[in-house]
Image (cartoon, rainbow, N blue to C red):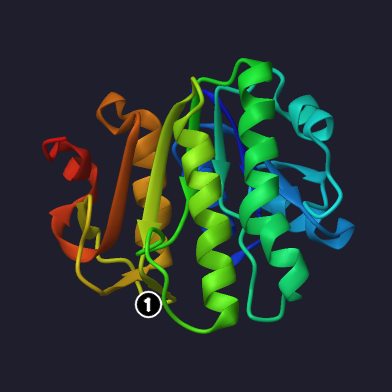
Amino acid sequence: MSAALVIGAHGRTGRLVVDELVTSGHQVTGTVRLAEHVKALHVSGAQAEVLDLLTATRDDLQRLMVGVHAVVYAAGSSTHTPLEAVNQVDGESIVRAADAAVLAGVRRFVLVSAHRTDEDFGGQRVMHLLRAKRAADAHLRGTTLGWTILRPDALTEQPPTGRVRLATAVPHGALPRADLAHLIRIALESPAAVRRQLEVTGGPVPIDRAFDTPR
């Protein structure tokens, strides 16, 4: 199977993506912010690279992408992330990663974005986050990469259901992180997922057939 780089591999979603890809036979390298997280990735069967998205340059990212077939950007800010850092993690670092992927010859790029990113709502923090993600999504769509943008709504730690609702726009709903990780793996392996931006929640469609829906 192909070599994949998971950016944000120690996050709650990223760890599940790593496990999903390793189990499916992909050769996985994950980025972690702290050196003490390296061992956890090794235990999962993945390689690890320490990378701080607040300081990483495009060249730093490109170096990690040499020989990589696919990139998954699963990093994201939390409620504890300083407001001034949100635009770095959820905006500018995505732009740098996309540009690095183009230069490195990466074929596939899956980005975890957010539900209703094209709208303005909520307080200052939410608005700041949405605008950063919106700009990053638009930049990725403008590249030559085989991109897929997934926009999940509320993510939960519930057991996976193996089913989703996936469309250009979907109503509010929850989605187990494990189901999102499974969907990301299917997106990487499915030609029908290329150059598609889709919202996703829990739903009735088996994940293995999620991208059979018309464009």
Q: Residues within 10 Å of mark 1 (few under 14, many from 20)?
A: few
**How many numbered marks have been drawn onto this rendered protein structure?**
1
In the foreground, 180 or 133: 133
Considering only vertical position in the picture, is 46 above or below 205?
A: above
In the rendered structure, the answer to whether residue 169 lies left or right of residue 185 reads left
Quadrant of the rendered image containing residue 4: top right
Helix, strand or loop for disc 1: loop
- Residue appearing at x 58%, y 80% in the figure: 124
Considering only vertical position in the picture, is 18 above or below 15?
A: above
In the rendered structure, the answer to whether residue 88 lies left or right of residue 117 reads right
Quadrant of the rendered image containing residue 98: top right
- Residue appearing at x 34%, y 29% in the figure: 194
In the foreground, 32 or 214: 214
Q: Quadrant of the C terminus?
A: top left
- Residue appearing at x 88%, y 56% in the figure: 35
Where residue 44 sits in the image (x, y, percent)? 63, 51
- Residue appearing at x 25%, y 66% in the figure: 161
Residue picked out by circle 1: 158
Farthest-out residue, bottom: 123
Where residue 60 sits in the image (x, y, percent)? 83, 33
Where residue 115 sits in the image (x, y, percent)? 36, 64
- Tell me the kind of residue under disc 1: Gln
Considering only vertical position in the picture, is 67 above or below 16?
A: above
Where residue 19 sits in the image (x, y, percent)? 53, 50
In the foreground, 36 or 145: 145
In the rendered structure, the answer to whether residue 159 lies left or right of residue 137 reads left
The answer to whether one can see residue 155 in this image is yes
The answer to whether one can see residue 28 in this image is no
